[in-house]
Image (cartoon, rainbow, N blue to C red):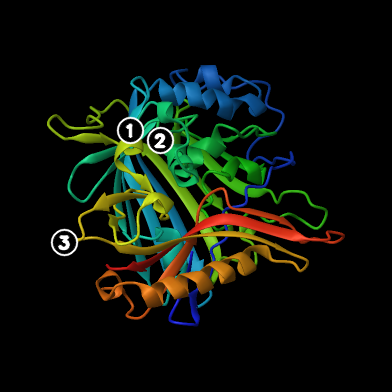
Amino acid sequence: MTGRRRGRAVAAVLAPLLLVGAAACDSGGKGTKGDKGDEGGKDGSGNAVFSLPPADQLVAARTATEGGGTVRFVSTLVYTAKGGGQLTDRTTGSQDFGADRAVAVQVQSTTGAFPQKAVAALRGENGRAWRSYSVEGDDVLYRTAKRTWLRYAASAGDISKEAALLSKRAGSTTPYGGTLADAVFGSFPEARPEKRSDGTRYYHVMTPAGVFADLVPDGFAPRAGSKGEAVPVSLEVELDAQGRLTRAEADLSALITDRETHGVTGIKAHLAFSEFGHKAPPSVRPGERTEDASKVLTELTKIKPGECAGHDTGLAGFSLLRRVDCSTAHDLRIFGQVRINETSKERIGLDGAYKMAQDRCEERYTDAPAAWTAKGRPAGTFYTLGAEGMEILGGGPGDDISIVKGDFTCYVKTS
């Protein structure tokens, strides 16, 4: 998305998350090396985990953790900026392993001089600092401000790339995904853990960066080392005497690239599991209404000029929106749809494609009825967004021509 205030750009294109595959790396452990066995906790209850070879213990801890039936969790990401400001992204909730469902509330807060561009990148287009989700198997539900639920059903397929990112909240290792549990259960210690007097175990493992892929947010890419290998991440893990995961911490700062981070210099992640066996709440309470996102949301490029849309979708961007009556509260109004199909002997690239689209949107802006643009915020500013599936071909070394094809939407923000 780019914005223009009648002839000058006011927003930059945000690059998508680049997920880099991770190569295997050495793992280290804290504690006693060379032990010939571990009979588990004082009552032997952790024997199924701790009597295994070290490399198998965290994988086995997944089964032990699931055996707890239900668990409360707190997953936290703390972003630190150059000036010392911080953004804390904390998700609290409950998971039911047997029913494969979860409920979670995500809240973001800032302290100090945390960059506004970074806040915008981490909160998405609608800027909400508070979100509520439920997971039912592979389906993810988002609670709207009107207290209804939007269901992003796995059976509907990938209705957009943004919806596919949201679907990662339906975890592959736990009901709620995108926490350090994914990394813990995919790590392989080389040394036996430190055994404490209460039967708990402490592990320190250097883990390949790839296992943190779903935890690192959109816009922050894992950084490769000097030889192209993935940078290993220091992961600390605690299991209780029954072999169940209770705590994990990792410093993800090494994964930050030098670009597209908007001043963020550090990311630390923390996960806590507690209250195994508690009575988990239902994912959707009786009487609450659910809607199928694939039926009630519309692609931005299919909304006609003059129509209005709302962005209370749970998605980071504007690829899918809800059509709303322009006489009611809305978040944006479309004043033009343009198509680019250009061939050039010079390199066009993404910036060039948006420049072409912006020029055409400016023409639409000038010709649009005043009622369509009068409520734009900031005043006199319009935005241009390219659709998924935009093609930019050629333009590299040895290419004779470059081609850009794609649909773009021209709109004003109204909230």
Q: What residue type is labelled 2?
A: Tyr
Q: Where is residue 400 in the image (x, y as percent from the top left)?
A: 83, 61
Tell me residue 190's x, y (percent). 70, 33
Spatial CA distance of label 3 from label 1 is 37 Å
How many marks do you count on the picture? 3
Q: Which of marks 2 and 1 is nearer the N terminus?
A: 1
The numbered mark, 3 or 1, whose residue comes first in the sequence reads 1
Mark 2 sits on what residue? Answer: 176
Q: Quadrant of the C terminus?
A: bottom left
Residue type, label 3: Ser
Q: Hey, which quadrant is residue 377 in on the image?
A: bottom left
Q: In this view, does 354 lie to the left or right of 157?
A: right
Mark 3 = which residue? 327
Q: Mark 2 falls on what kind of element? A: loop
Choose mark 3 or mark 2, whichever is in front. Answer: 3
Q: In this view, does 403 lie above or below 153?
A: below
Q: Which mark is residue 102?
A: 1
Element class at badge 3: loop
Is residue 85 at all visible to an observer of this figure? no
